[in-house]
Image: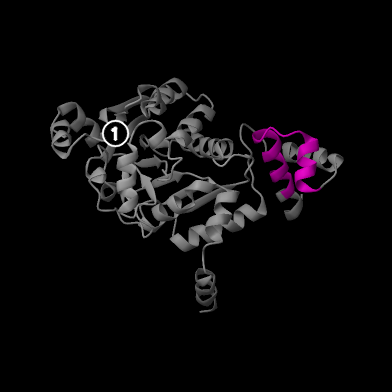
Amino acid sequence: MQGNERSLAARAAWLSFIGGYTQEEIAQKLGLSRVKINRLIAEATEAGLVRVFVEGNAAECVALESRIAAHWQLDFCSVSPTVDDNALPLRTLAAAGAHYLHGVLERGEAKLIGIGHGRTLDEVVRYLPRIARPDIRFVSLLGSLTRHAAANPFDVIHRLVEVTGAECYFMPAPFFADSIADKKVLLAQKSLKDVFSLARAAELYVVGIGEVGSQAHMLATGTVTEKELREVKRAGAVGEVIGRFLDKTGKAVAAELNDRAVALKLEEIKGKSVVAIAGGANKIEAIKAVLESHVIKGLITDEATAKAIVDTLDGSDVAAGKKMAKR
């Protein structure tokens, strides 16, 4: 297949195998005939683009990947075609995130992996095919208890045990302590000290990114109260990563909630291999804030989110790149 044809075949495969759309629906979305879509999907399969995941991407996604990675100096950026109609593209992010994590596990790239929290990571693990890796260890990066036990982040770790047979460690503590004094007491416990030591030693960190708007997942699950969320927003917060609320420049805001987080500090993982999996119309500012913090080295997102992020850039990064290329 030629470049344009391969790009179309990859997009059609994503919509079919990940999005669950019929060939008629895909034809309408791409403005092509149903016969053409049928042929593209067949070619994608024959070319080895479709296995458990779609091995390939649309050319437009590749261009977005390059722009984001260059602007924020990431080791890599993975952008997948958006197949969801919802504000939070969980199917797309789950498929792309599981593809990445499955590759890490299959190749044995990391033996100790730190795991964050949230809906997106929960879906990633749900989408992950079973792969026996009893030699690998997963460790939670934050307190695993919330006010609503049914929605606590421990579920991510629990499912990883079921899928991989790996050793998994969670932090037996609330995500946010009720006070600074309570946090000090918790951190003095040997069981928590041991998990923190393990988390600091991880070779790879996979995290989610939280928003601070009215649809914030942490608010819905009772992880934070409306009052606490208002306070961090007044302090300038636009996003959150492993319990630290950041302003648009990527700096942690001056709010007590940040100090009460029972989680690794961002300074403890900065400079290490940290990959964020996030996307959605409500998370644009949050993702940009985390990118500005330069804590993460890799970003896995969807096409609509990536395009929205790139549309906010002024083009100076492209000009700078062209200038460097001429030298």
**Tag 1 secondary structure:** loop
In this view, the residue in front, 219 or 19, is 219
| Visual colour scheme | one colour
Percent position of residue 208, x then y: 42, 41
In the image: residue 271, left or right of residue 7: left
Where residue 50 sits, quadrant-wise, is top right
- Say which residue appears at 72% left-offset and 34% top-offset: 21
Magenta stretch holds residue 26:
yes
Question: In the image, what residue type sits under mark 1?
Answer: Phe
Residue 40 visible? The answer is no
Crowdedness near tag 1: few (<14), some (14–19) or many (≥20) residues, C-alpha within 10 Å: many
The answer to whether residue 131 is above or below residue 196 is: above
**Which residue carries the number 1 mark?**
175
Q: How many marks?
A: 1
- Secondary structure mostly taken by the magenta-highlighted segment of the chain: helix
In the image: residue 302, left or right of residue 168: right
- Start-end of magenta stretch: 8-31
- Say which residue appears at 26% left-offset and 30% top-offset: 174
- Say which residue appears at 37% left-offset and 46% top-offset: 240
Magenta stretch holds residue 188:
no
Percent position of residue 67, x then y: 54, 61
Where residue 275 sits, quadrant-wise, is top left
In this view, the residue in front, 184 or 255, is 255
In the image: residue 215, left or right of residue 255: right
In this view, the residue in front, 136 or 244, is 244
